[in-house]
Each structure stands twice: as C-alpha cells, then as structure tokens.
Image (cartoon, rainbow, N blue to C red):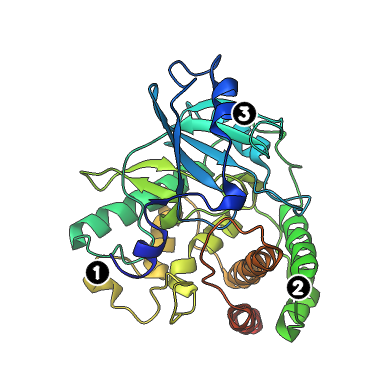
Amino acid sequence: MTGRQAQFGGEEAPPPHLAIDLDRLAAWLAPRLPGMDLHLSLAKFKGGQSNPTYRLSGPGGDYVLRRKPPGTLLPSAHRIDREYRILSALRDSGVPIPGTHGYCADPGVIGSEFYIVDHVAGRVFWEADMGDASRSERIAVYDDMNRLLAMLHDLDPAAIGLSDLAPPDGYAARNLARWSKNYVQSCMTKIADMDWLIDRLPQHVPETAQTRFIHGDYGLYNLIIAQDTPRIVAVLDWEMATLGDPLIDLAHHLRAWWDLPDSGLAATSLYGRDVSALGIPTMEAYVALYCARRGIAVPDLRWYLAFAQFRYAAMVQGILKRAADGTASSRVMVHSQNRVRRIAAMARMTLEG
C-alpha cells in the first residue's frame, strides 16, 4: 500500500494521550456485553482526525469503541451521544450501519464519553480512485455509493424517529453560521478569502426545497466495502448527520471531484484523472444519476459547491487547531495552513462564477 491508503488504513497502538484503562472499561462492559469483562485488547484505527476509534477485542468477540477526544473541545463538536442515537435510529432503515451496544456518558470510565458498536469486517478505500481495485469494482462501488445517498435522502425523518434532530427549516443559514463561528474560533492566521466568504455566502443562501435526513460527511472514506464483493456493508461517521438540505450533503460528497490535488496525503482528488478509464463517472454524470434516482431535476449547484468548499476549509482549520493544541485524533498531520488558503480561494472562485 502507498499514499493515503498506507497512512490511514489499518490499526496502530494508541498514542499516550489516547490510551484507555482496559480494567475500568472491562468493568463497564461486564453487565452489557457477555465475554467482554476481562482479557481485553485495543488497537486504534489509524484513519480519521475527529473522534478516536478503536477495535476492541476480547473473549466475547470484536467490537468498535468510538470516543470523544480528550481536552478542551468546541461546544458543538464531537457529539458522540447524538451519533449513537442516530445509529440506533437507523437500525431498520435499510441503510447499512454497525449494530449498537451501548453509550457511556461518564467520562470517568475512559476519560471521555464513548459508545460501543459491532465491528464490521471489510475494506475502506482512502483514495477516490480505489487504488488497485478493478474497473468493474469501481463501477459497482460508485453506483452503490450513489444509490445509498439517494436512498438516505429519501428517508422520512419522522419514520425513523429523528424528526426532532434539528429544526425543520433554516438549515443552510444555521450550518453556515456554525462553520463560520467554528472557523473564527480555530483561526490561527488571517485568510482574506475566508473572511470574504463569511461575508458573502449568507447573502446568497438558496431557499431550501425540502428538509431531509442528511449524513454530513458521506464519502468513500466513510464506507466499509465487503471483502469479497463490491458492495457497501456499513456507512460510518454520523457525527454531523442532521436534518437539512440534501443538496448541501451532495455538494460535500462531491469533494473527490472538486478537491484540489495535493502533493502530500491531504487530498483524495480525481482532478485531472481519466475517470472514464477508471470506471468512475464524471461529476456531472454522478449528479444526474443521483437526481434520477430521487426523481428531481438536476439543480444549479454553484452556491452549494462554494459552501461545501468553505466548510471543508473550516474543517481543515479545525484539524490544524486541534493539532496545535495537542488534541488531534490522528498521529499524522496531513494538512497545512496553505491548504486552507487554497481551498478558500477555490470557494471564492466558485461563488463568483
């Protein structure tokens, strides 16, 4: 393996600040999971920058533990309790998710809130081109990824018990305000294009055609693909799921097509690639297929893409701030301050047309 796949795929020993007292954890697990009351072992998944995630093994089998990172955090971030509620609500929705086994609100057990879910075996592709996968596998996985996103956006929030997850209206303006605030709190150096976007994006917020249940960070890197077939067996990382405009979710999901190439490990970009040869649709074809599946007209995505780019720049800035504060989940920092500048410039160009 090379590049992002080597860097983020697989497991590692937790760094000291993310170590867990297994005796205390075993005592908490004892009445909840048979066979997980002793002889536990723990390995941290290498990928991810937000909520540390571990494979937990014991006589009772393999599970996944996901926790809040330690340290001082942004008030609206790392909502482990909310993510656990969403996973539980999706159990019978048709969206493949890991089964849930318990949430702990007591930070005294391992040092922060956490939850336990099933360990789902399979493959995670950290590169948008899926590395050494065959062309037929790429065709199938991208089609299944498109199908699941359309299905997710067609779920009735009330039918899955999530109609109170967020206010029914005003998501775009609220989310924009939230990420603008997060960016300001995480900012470590002035970036003129980010300031310009914070001023201009609110002036052009589109009217939301509908409010649906959305994932917030739906991408290939948050999907588990079956080991022996090109089929999605689990959708991960529901931290930012909410009720909102599905076109915002779609625009963020399209990042592999619009993200800027990076000489390091930060980007998983298809920019400049012969996607047809790879078996991957163009962004336009992918959007058209999604819209056909949902029975909607192909929309003008300019504002949505500009906002997705701004929001991603703000996310990267948050990662940089956590790294500076010593609370980042991943041992490797793949982003740089210059990357925030480049993404912000792209977002401004997108909005200006």
Q: Which residue is mark 1?
A: 278
Residue 77, placed above or below residue 266: above
Binning the other alpha carbons within 10 Å of mark 1 as few (below 14), some (14 to 19) or many (20 upward) gives: some
Q: N-terminal of the two: label 1 or label 2?
A: 2
Horizontal arrangement in the rendering, residue 93 relative to residue 301 (left or right):
left
Residue 50, placed above or below residue 112: below
Q: Residue at position x 66%, y 31% from top?
A: 109
Q: Which residue is mark 3?
A: 103
Secondary structure at badge 3 equals strand
Locate residue 117, reporting x and y percent: 49, 31
Q: Residue at position x 65%, y 44% from top?
A: 68
Residue type marked 3 = Tyr
* Alpha carbons under labels 1 and 3: distance apart: 41 Å
Q: N-terminal of the two: label 1 or label 3?
A: 3
Quarter holding the C terminus is bottom right
Residue type marked 2 = Cys
Residue 170, placed above or below residue 284: above
Q: Residue at position x 62%, y 49% from top?
A: 240
Along the viewing direction, whichever of 272 and 325 lies nearer the viewer: 325
Locate residue 127, reporting x and y percent: 36, 65
Q: Which residue is mark 2?
A: 187
Along the viewing direction, whichever of 208 and 77 lies nearer the viewer: 77
* Alpha carbons under labels 2 and 3: distance apart: 32 Å
